[in-house]
Image (tube, grey):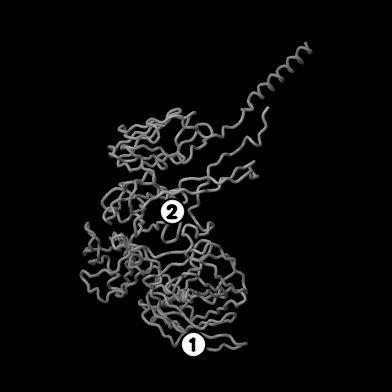
Amino acid sequence: MKQFKYFFSAAVLLLLAACASIGRPDGGPFDEEPPVLLEAVPHIGATNVAGKKIELVFNENIRLEKAFDKVVVSPPQMQMPEVKYSGKRVFVELQDSLIPATTYSIDFSDAIVDNNEGNPYENFVYYFSTGEVVDTFAVSGTVLAAENLEPVKGVVVGLHSCLDDTAFTGKPFERVSRTDSRGRFTIKGIAPGDYRVYALSDANQNYLFDQKSEAIAFMGSSVRPFASEAIRPDTVWRDSLTIDTIKFVKYTRFQPDDIVLRLFKEEFHNQYLVKSQREPHNKLMLYFAAPNKELPIIEGIGFNADSAFVLERTAKNDSLTLWFRDSTLYRADTLAMRLTYKVIDSTGVFVDRIDTLYSTTKRKWEKIRQQEREKYEKEAANFLKLAKKREDYDENNPPVYTPLATPLPVRFSGSSSMDVNATVRLTFDEPLLSLDTAAIHVSVKSDTLWVPVDFVLEHSRTNIRQYNLYAEWLPGETFLVQADSAAFKGIYGAASKEFKQEMRFRPLDDYAVLYLDIRGAGDNAVVQLLDKAEKVVQQTKCKNSRCAFYFIKPGTYYLRLFVDDNGNGVWDTGNYEKALQPERVYYYPHSLELRALFEYTQDDWDITMPLDKQKPLEITKQKPDKERKKLNRNATRKFK
């Protein structure tokens, strides 16, 4: 019996081992070949086609990946075609009526993949003609964001044979393509002739520019497609690392293939009052949907608004703050005002709009008054408690508690470690009623003594509660900024306390200097020094194609240039109706590693190099999609 038990146990173990081995079959080699097209109905390049159904037959089961995004039909279809698959077949049914004597193309990109391993059938374009001839010309190029040369993915690029400017705004494109992750596009099946090329972020998918919120690009001239014979190198690999031979192969080159379209949004302001907010009670904030060139007209209902408040505004007038001066106004439960500002009507014309605002803060104001009352009573009780302990306390004539005024805070940007080119700022919690420059002192440390220096205190152009302090800040030196008490007084009566702040500026040894000689820049070029996040660190204007940056902290930097055509110091967008292109932008194609104590001269920047080759990849946010290549997994796999 024992022998039988041992035999039975061994048999069970062997059986389990055999079962376990069944769970890890070898499986054979991986499928690394893409599907093969066996048949197309109608056949590729067919002419005089009248039907709207297409069927594609492959040698293995397939599936479609992101067909809605990848499959592009040209001419564009107002009704989305039906694209589906089953087994080894792909079915396409066009919904629009077919246009006579027209070449149709269906660009599948890499949407068709085999069902098992996902190997793509790449760059597949099916085409046919409803006439006698199949048109074969093509144009290619790149779409870049005009402001920062980012490749734009998924934007529609289209052609018009009508060269009139109104075609873009009144007619759908005749032929279309869509940009890939590199911003590249190719429009195929083009008939001979002249065309205008456009790019459009087609929000409503009607293939024309009819919404000002849509980003667009246009060329100032037309293009004429053509083809020529060309030669290209073709590398034959012995294995994955070794080149066998390089052959030169003839092919047909379709041109132009280097079109660059700079995509931009027009300055369109669908202006309206988003909200009004009165908190705290002494100021009213107005938020608008977009910038406005003109300030709104504000009229008080029941009070004179001419001198009732101090107006604080942002640089683009899209946010306003009304600081009410009179306490009888801001302590009122409700304030009523009439606001007149510009909006755009349905015809695109600016017209006046009048809004009536009722600002109510009854509950909030009651809470504030209750808090002030409780604070006063608590402080008065403590004052009286202390007064009773004094020997001169007279119960019949007790002292009256007078609360101390809350001082006006001064927020000073200076610190113990400052950059020489930093702006020293003084910011206040409320607009100032007055300031006394005689009560402000700036000194530099010389040995153990403080020596007075000249300074300028300038009101900020963008913030009425901010002042900029300028002096000859010297590298490596220590400065002292002082202000006597009551040097600053706010509109609500609060005065500042005495304050002093030392500032030590970094020595020259902490900085690098960069000199630039830019070919083709001109005198109206503005150059920006950028950090790794593309934030502007410094900005300067060119003169005779030259400029310089000083006091640069050590680190990695990049360079951007824009041609300031109107001389306002900022980049400006374009306008299609005015045939105005956005201001041109260029990048230095390499990063700069700057070290302290070094002076660098860069004279190899040529802004005339192709735009799509300029922006360094490390700061390009729209990275190209990884190429879908054969994995070649069988090369390292052993088979029995």
Identify the secondary structure beneath mark 2.
strand
Does 528 appear above or below 186? below
Identify the secondary structure beneath mark 1.
loop
* Residue 382 percent coordinates (x, y): 45, 73
Towards the viewer: 367 or 499: 499
Which label belongs to residue 454? 1
Which label belongs to residue 481? none
Q: From mark 1 to mark 2, how far is it between C-alphas?
A: 54 Å
At label 2, which amino acid type do we have? Thr
For the question of whether residue 210 can be seen, the reply is: no
The C terminus, quarter of image = top right
Residue lying furthest right: 3
User: For the residue carrying disc 1, how many other residues have a C-alpha within 10 Å: few (<14), some (14-19), or many (20+)?
Assistant: few
At label 1, which amino acid type do we have? Asp
* Residue 98 percent coordinates (x, y): 29, 37
Q: Earlier in the sequence, mark 1 or mark 2?
A: 2
The answer to whether 135 appears left or right of 438 in the picture is left
Residue denoted by label 2: 142
* Residue 388 percent coordinates (x, y): 46, 78
Towards the viewer: 31 or 66: 31
For the question of whether residue 256 can be seen, the reply is: yes
Q: Quadrant of residue 86?
A: top left
